[in-house]
Amino acid sequence: MLNRRQLIIAAARSSVLLSSAFVLTACSDSDSTAVSLPPTEPGSLDEYTRQMQAISYIGVACRENIGFHEDQPIEAIKADLEQRLLADLGESTANDSISDAVDQAIRNDFSAGRLIEIDGWQLSETECRLAALAAVQQGFETAQAPAPPKDRYGKIVEINAWGPQSTIQGQIFNEQPDGHGGIWLQATGIPASVVLQFGGKTQGTQVYADHLTSGLRDEYMHEVIDTPGVYQVELYDKASLMRQVVGEFTVKASGDQPRKIPDEQLASCKIDTWGPDKGRVGEAFNRQPSGASAFWVRTKCAAEGSQLLLDGEALKTTLRKDLLTATAPNGHQLGVGPHELELRIGSGPQLVKVGTLFIEP
């Protein structure tokens, strides 16, 4: 059975690939490196191997594997390779390049099964001997595993909305049927390799066509919600090693929760009508063109700056005369059961209960 290395050779071997851009690769579970062969101009074996790059790891490993010792004359290594390349090139001409010989020698090695395994990867004997010679010439005596690649910040996707962005100390946010606190994010074209990180810790993530879902579970969720604080939320693409800041999630101290005033104490504020009061799990209620869910509330007491809150989370709210409308981007992700809708009057702390939205199975 061909392993990945052999499959790459069998499927992609071509004169152009080998001569101009062929890469020798060896990797383990924790390290990986690439050895690049130099361009195809004719020249001596010395010139060829001195131009080889990224052989600090695989070159030393190959040297040790095929029995080259530090005290072995470099001329003996070169003579061995030159003889091998001349034999594999066959009828050479003055215009043939070292790359032509390397190309043919590698082909012959794989055809004949002359392979050397380095950290689970298959290299041809010629590849390994070239890397070993380059390591000797360039003075590498001990294998230097490559430094792990560094993450970088940038833009992975255009984020349309996400939430929830806060909770009150001790309260599970956007509680799901299995008890975990759900987090949602809307965006188009999210790579399948993206995960959500909360406070620097990767959380289980499901990626869909236009959104992703994630959340906090078990001990970590309770650790977060039990202590007031601010946590950074990020997207991390495991394929490109790119990070994107989503925003901050705040756990507010229980004393910061706005005081709820019963309706009877707010005689001047009466909720006339509102809706919808029912929805089905997994579906948007009162679906809008954007795909978000939406509420409407009629009341004569709402002042400028008033907001509707769903399960304590402020919604983007618009006021027109006595009509309030608000969108809930995560409406299709609400768990089965009751969800409280409230109205905050103006910018003050007063909260008026609007009603209860029931999500049915």
Image: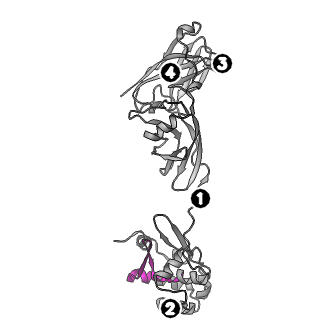
- Report if residue 126 lies within the magenta region: yes
Q: Earlier in the sequence, mark 4 or mark 1?
A: 1
x and y percentages locating residue 229 in the rendered image: 58, 36
> Of residues 180 and 222, which is closer to you in this image?
222
Residue 164: % across, % down = 53, 33
Q: CA distance from mark 4 to mark 1?
A: 45 Å
Name the residue furthest left.
1
Can residue 214 be seen here?
Answer: no
Asked whether, in this view, residue 144 is left or right of residue 282, the answer is: right
Rendered location of residue 341, percent (x, y): 50, 21
Q: CA distance from mark 2 to mark 4?
A: 81 Å
Name the residue carrying label 2: 80
Question: Does 300 appear above or below 51?
Answer: above
Q: Give the mark nearest the N terminus, 3 or 1.
A: 1
In the figure, residue 284 lies in which quadrant?
top left
Location of mark 4 (residue): 341
Residue 304: mark in rendering: 3
Which is more foreground, mark 2 or mark 1? 1
Cα–Cα span, label 3 and label 1: 48 Å
Q: Is residue 342 above or below residue 210?
A: above
Whole-Å distance between the Cαs marked 4 and 3?
19 Å
**SS at mark 4 in the image:** strand
The correct choice, above or below, for 323 with respect to 205 in the image is: above
| 4 or 3: tag closer to the N-terminus | 3
Residue type at mark 3 is Glu
Residue 302 found in image quarter: top right
| Three-letter residue code for mark 2 | Asp
* Badge 4 vs badge 3, beta-carbon distance below 8 Å: no
The residue tagged 1 is 150
Dot 3: within a 10 Å radius of its alpha carbon, few (fewer than 14), some, or many (20 or more) residues? Answer: few
Q: Quadrant of the C terminus?
A: top left
